Image (tube, rainbow, N blue to C red):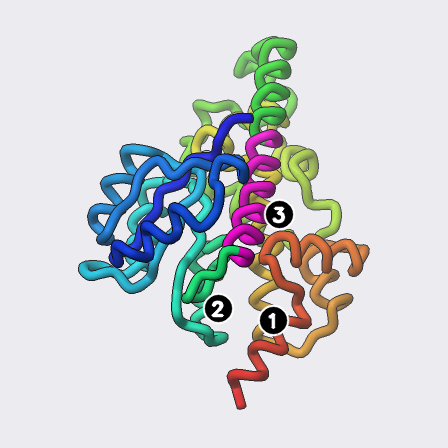
Amino acid sequence: MLLLKIVLVEDEFYIRETLKRVIDWKTEGCEIVDEAASGKQAIDKIRKQHPDLILLDINLPDINGFEVIERLKQEGEKAKIIIITGYDTFEFAKKAISYGVTDYILKPVMAAELINVIRRVSARTREEKKEKMAFQQLTDDICRLIPLVDAKTLKNNQQLAPEQESKHGLIRKIKQFVEENIGNEELNVDYVSKKLFLNTSYLSHVFKKETEQGLREYIYALRMNHAYDIAVNSEKSLEEIAEEVGYKDAAYFGKCFKKYYGVSISNIRKIQNKYKK
């Protein structure tokens, strides 16, 4: 089994050493390939290693963990991030989610909790890697099987030729269409290609190349983010939220939401209400 690469970021030496030894990382399918004691050092190490997971302390001596996350996002790093923190408030949890943090562990770190989080995040990471490989293979197969279509044929079929619009403009157009139709249960890659008069394989290839994210994954993430905003800013029921983000089956939507955020809508609201008091 290929080991997932982890970069450990913690300014306190004894905590780093404890985290390195508290569990058998190879048994969990992981390997700590590098470590850092500051935010700037962390960015340099992550740039070099391109890890699958980052264990990140928030309180660092130079720049805090959220600033590290922001810079990594700007550079296109895709690693899953697990925060190590002493903060246990709803506002902190909300901020962590808004930064795309996958999970977080409270200090002092307990071995059992660390193992559970690592297993959960590792499983998701491996599944995404498999999906990415399968998607890439499918895209490659399609590109080999479908002949190139010339500009005249594209025009006759009312399809968008590459030279008629810049790729950046096309991506903006696709994203705008997805946002405007997020509540449509029919919204998927085929639906977008049909409505925008785009060849499906061309659409998938360009979107993936320009954004480093599949269109299917983009639609899913946008639905989950929109659902989160509705959940924390309204009292709408699970069924109402599901409908607003394009899910006909509320129960299935609930499972998807919990899998994506690691917590159910009802639990998010319980935490929110607890810290509002």
Residue 239 in percent (x, y) is at 77, 66
Left or right: residue 204 versus residue 56 is right
Q: Is residue 93 above or below residue 176?
A: below
24 drawn magenta: no
Q: Amino acid at mark 2?
A: Lys
* Quadrant in the picture for residue 154: top right
Discs 2, 1 touching: Cβ within 8 Å: no
Residue 225 in percent (x, y) is at 56, 58
Say which residue appears at 48% left-offset and 42% top-offset.
Answer: 24
**Does residue 203 appear anywhere in the picture?**
no
Per the rendering, the mark at residue 94 is 2
Residue 2 in percent (x, y) is at 51, 26
Q: Residues within 10 Å of mark 3 (few under 14, many from 20)?
A: some
122 drawn magenta: yes
Left or right: residue 36 versus residue 132 is left
Q: Is residue 63 above or below residue 91?
A: above
Which residue lies most toward the bottom here? 277
SS category of the residue bearing label 3: helix
Counting residues from the N terminus, which is met first, the one under dot 2 or under dot 1?
A: 2
Q: Amino acid at mark 3?
A: Tyr
Q: CA distance from mark 3 to mark 2?
A: 20 Å
Per the rendering, the mark at residue 220 is 3
Residue 266 in percent (x, y) is at 68, 72
Type of secondary structure dominating the magenta stretch: helix
Tell which tag, 1 or 3, sits nearer the viewer.
Answer: 1
Q: Which residue is mark 1?
A: 268
**Region rendered in magenta:** 112-131
SS category of the residue bearing label 2: helix
Quick one: 204 or 32, which is closer to the camera?
A: 32
Counting residues from the N terminus, which is met first, the one under dot 1 or under dot 3?
A: 3
